[in-house]
């Protein structure tokens, strides 16, 4: 893993107007916010191998009045919510339908959609690259512990996802890059690849998971490279709703910090 570089907070000043609504709207983990990226632009989550398994599932503790009726608790659901309040259950869960795409692993349906999106981008003269996809629970333990040993737990909890709390573990999320040399940095938001993907990802079932200035809800600073698959129907509804983040769209409370 590359040596940690603190660039997350710089992303707060790097957002452009398009990012506020992008996609109707974390070095790859290899490393990033929802996975544990030193070079991402804001808090990511995490904890050592002794992660507390006590947090309630989304289905148990989210506000029911406005919450969607989708399955947000089952780890294999395309609508599973994973953030600082809602870890995977069990914590070490792994998908059983992983396939290879672009040098990483993704769930089969996600890989197919990603291939279509990459092809569409290529038709526009854009060369998207896949930087990071599925990350296992054991991998995240190593990543998080490296942060704790180097910088202490407080800093680790703002830069690396706790094991079981990383969206990358679902196989539904990935980090993209380009050949421009600005990958996993705030400046990636200004590239044609980032802007095209943010504007068009919903057509393929994806959303920009950590939009600009939404860290007080998502728990992570702006990551213009991190996309999450929720399916075409849900992604289109997200786009049409003009929701600011996935938590709000699905009717969940803000999850800026861990509950334990």
Image (cartoon, rainbow, N blue to C red):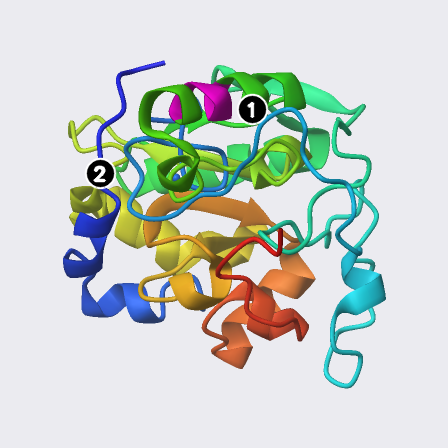
- Checking the image for residue 140, the label placed there is 1
Q: Which residues are magenta?
A: 143-147
Which quadrant is home to the N terminus? Answer: top left
Residue 185 image label? 2
Report which quarter residue 107 is drawn in.
top right
Q: Position of residue 68 (x, y in %)?
A: 76, 73
Residue 35, percent from left and from top: 49, 34
Q: Is residue 116 above or below residue 206?
A: above
Disc nearest the viewer among 2 and 1: 1
Label 1: how many Cα within 10 Å (few below 14, some 14–19, many 20+) = many
The answer to whether 106 is drawn above or below residue 22 in the figure is: above
* Residue beneath the point at 51% across and 37% down: 161
Q: Inspect the magenta stretch and tell me whether residue 144 lies in it.
A: yes
Q: Secondary structure at mark 2?
A: loop
Q: Nearer the viewer, residue 76 or 91?
A: 91
Q: Residue 30: say if magenta.
A: no
| Residue at position x 48%, y 54% in the image | 209
Q: Main secondary structure of the magenta part?
A: helix
What's the CA distance linking mark 2 and mark 1? Answer: 21 Å
Q: Could you tell whether 64 is left or right of 210 in the image?
A: right
Residue 81 image point, x, y percent: 68, 54
Earlier in the chain: of badge 2 and badge 1, it is 1
> What SS does tag 1 mark?
helix
Residue plotted at (82% across, 35% down): 90
With respect to residue 234, does 221 lie above or below? Answer: above
Which label was assigned to residue 219? Answer: none
Q: What residue is drawn where x is 39% and y is 39%?
A: 26
């Amino acid at each position: 893993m590359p040596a940690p570089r603190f660039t997350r907070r710089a992303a707060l000043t790097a957002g452009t107007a398009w990012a506020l609504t992008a996609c109707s709207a974390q070095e790859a983990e290899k490393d990033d916010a929802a996975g544990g990226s030193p070079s991402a632009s804001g808090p990511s989550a995490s904890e050592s191998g002794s992660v507390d398994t006590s947090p309630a599932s989304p289905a148990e503790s989210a506000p029911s009045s406005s919450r969607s009726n989708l399955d947000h608790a089952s780890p294999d659901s395309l609508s599973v919510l994973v953030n600082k309040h809602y870890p995977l259950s069990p914590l070490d869960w792994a998908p059983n339908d992983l396939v290879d795409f672009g040098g990483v692993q993704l769930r089969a349906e996600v890989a197919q959609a990603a291939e279509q999106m990459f092809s569409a981008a290529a038709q526009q003269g854009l060369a998207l690259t896949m930087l990071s996809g599925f990350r296992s629970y054991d991998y995240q333990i190593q990543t998080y512990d490296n942060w704790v040993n180097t910088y202490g737990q407080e800093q680790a909890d703002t830069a690396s996802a706790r094991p079981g709390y990383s969206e990358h573990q679902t196989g539904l999320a990935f980090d993209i890059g380009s050949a421009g040399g600005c990958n996993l940095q705030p400046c990636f938001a200004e590239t044609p690849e980032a802007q095209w993907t943010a504007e068009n990802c919903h057509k393929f079932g994806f959303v920009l998971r950590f939009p600009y200035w939404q860290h007080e809800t998502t728990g992570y600073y702006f990551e213009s490279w991190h996309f999450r698959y929720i399916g075409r129907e849900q992604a289109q509804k997200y786009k049409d709703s003009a929701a600011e983040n996935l938590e709000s769209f699905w009717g969940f409370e803000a999850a800026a910090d861990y509950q334990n």
